[in-house]
Structure formats: structure tokens, C-alpha cells
């Protein structure tokens, strides 16, 4: 199993080194900009997590891998492990680099201190794994390119549904159109933060458990889909 993970990493080593070098420099520049830092770290870690898929699609090596004396289920499980390793390494490197810079630089007091905590990076890791849990079954069913198109369609539809449901709930509680009233939006966000802060550890535990459950179900689906796929 670990040999398959190493195969994924070795096949994409040039891309991964490029992402590490350029992404590391970008993270360093973003360390003092909270929102941009979060977006940059998420993209940086996603490239490390899914970079091997892009390389495999470009080099068309999938038929070579399935000709190895391993089961398709093992290939699928290894791909999930590769994604986990890539995402975790990306987030760990980003945290170490930005945390070091904000401690050494004169403007450290203005840095995104709350965003540099390990727990915040655990949340980002969970979000990346949720993305993987949706995308990887599509990848194993349709391939990297078509799978990505299906994922984007699902993501857009999901965002629309979530925004409509959220707005309906808020309207029913008397908040109205928050986008037209930034002050009410800020007040609502502050109330949400005040409610979540004392319960953060419990919420994080539930979140980690939910992510683990979703990824486990996704892995089962991917294995069944890939074993039934005609290549």
C-alpha cells in the first residue's frame, strides 16, 4: 500500500517540488493578510493533495498502474492516502512557515494570529478532505477531467442551495436580506462567533468525526465504482 502512495508522489515529484517552492514563497508573502492567507494555503495544500492526479491524466499512466499485481481497491485506498498526505504536508508547512515569519518579522502583531493556530489548520484539512470525498468517487468513475467538471457542477449547485436555504432560515427569523445591510451581517457574525468560541473544542471534535465518516463512505463508494469500471 505504501509503495502505491510512494508511486503517486514519485510520479508527480517535479510538480510537487515546484508547488512547494513557489507556494512556500507565496505563503510567506501572505502571512500578514488573513483572508488571502486562508485562500492561498487552501490552494497550496490542494495542489499538493491532487497534483498526482493531474500528472497521471497528462501522462495517461492509469492503464499502467492497474496492470500491476495489486487490486483496484488497493489503488483506490492508496490514492486516498496520497491525498491525505499531500493535504497534511501542505498545511503543516504553511503553518510552520507563516508562524515562524510572524514571530520574527516586526509586523508580527498585525499578522493573522487566530488563523495561524493548529486547530484552524485542522479545520482547513477537514475541508480539503470533504472536497476529496466528493471529487475522488467522480474521478474513479469518469476520470480526472470529466470528474472535475462533475465536481464543479455539484459544487455550484450546492452553494446555490445552501445560500437559498440559509437566506430562507434567516428571513424566517426576521433578519431579512443581510447582503443589503452589512451592519446586520456583522452583528450576526459576531453573535455566531461568541456562541462558537466556548464550544470550539466540542464543535471541532464533531467536525473531525463527521469528516472521517464522510471520507470512509466515499472510500467505499470509490472502491466499488472503480472495481466495476471498464478500462
Image (tube, grey):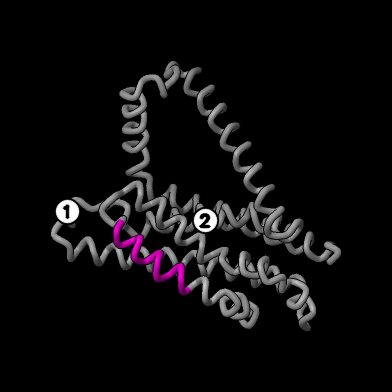
Q: Is residue 148 left or right of residue 205?
A: right
Residue 112 appears at what percent x and percent y? 27, 51
Dominant SS in magenta: helix
Please provide percent x and percent y for residue 195: 35, 36
In the displayed structure, does residue 98 sit left or right of residue 158? Answer: left
Q: Which of the 4 image quarters holds residue 117?
A: bottom left
Q: Secondary structure at mark 2?
A: helix
**Is 104 left or right of 10, judged from the image as shown?**
left
Label 1 Cα crowd, 10 Å radius (few <14 / some 14-19 / many 20+) = few
| Residue segment shown in magenta | 17-29
Vertical position of residue 79 compared to residue 136: above or below: below
Residue found 27% across the figure and 63% down from its top: 99
- Taking the magenta stretch, the answer to whether it contains residue 18 is yes
Q: Which residue is mark 2?
A: 128
Q: Residues within 10 Å of mark 2 (few under 14, many from 20)?
A: many
Q: At 42% from the left edge and 70% from the top edge, which residue is drawn?
A: 20
> Looking at the image, which is closer to me, 11 or 224?
11
Quadrant of res 219: bottom right
Q: Residue at x 79, y 79 (%)?
A: 67
Residue beneath disc 1: 109
Q: Residue, x 38% and y 51% (percent of image)? A: 38
**Farthest residue in the left direction?**
106
SS at mark 1 in the image: helix
Amino acid at each position: 500500500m505504501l509503495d502505491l502512495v510512494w508511486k503517486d508522489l514519485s510520479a508527480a515529484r517535479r510538480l510537487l517540488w515546484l508547488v512547494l517552492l513557489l507556494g512556500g514563497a507565496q505563503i510567506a508573502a501572505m502571512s500578514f493578510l488573513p483572508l488571502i492567507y486562508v485562500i492561498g494555503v487552501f490552494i497550496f495544500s490542494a495542489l499538493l493533495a491532487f497534483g498526482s492526479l493531474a500528472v497521471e491524466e497528462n501522462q495517461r499512466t492509469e492503464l499502467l498502474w492497474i496492470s500491476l499485481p495489486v487490486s483496484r481497491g488497493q489503488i483506490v485506498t492508496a490514492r486516498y492516502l496520497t491525498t491525505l498526505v499531500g493535504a497534511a504536508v501542505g498545511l503543516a508547512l504553511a503553518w510552520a512557515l507563516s508562524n515562524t515569519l510572524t514571530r520574527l518579522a516586526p509586523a508580527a502583531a498585525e499578522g493573522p494570529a487566530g488563523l495561524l493556530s493548529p486547530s484552524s489548520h485542522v479545520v482547513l484539512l477537514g475541508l480539503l478532505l470533504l472536497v476529496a470525498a466528493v471529487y475522488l468517487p467522480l474521478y474513479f468513475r469518469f476520470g480526472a477531467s470529466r470528474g472535475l467538471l462533475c465536481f464543479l457542477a455539484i459544487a455550484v449547485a450546492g452553494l446555490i442551495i445552501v445560500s437559498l436555504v440559509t437566506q430562507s432560515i434567516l428571513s424566517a427569523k426576521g433578519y431579512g436580506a443581510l447582503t443589503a445591510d452589512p451592519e446586520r451581517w456583522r452583528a450576526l457574525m459576531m453573535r455566531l462567533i461568541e456562541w462558537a468560541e466556548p464550544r470550539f473544542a466540542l464543535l471541532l471534535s464533531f467536525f473531525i468525526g463527521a469528516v472521517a465518516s464522510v471520507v470512509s463512505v466515499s472510500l467505499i463508494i470509490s472502491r466499488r465504482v472503480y472495481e466495476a469500471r471498464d478500462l
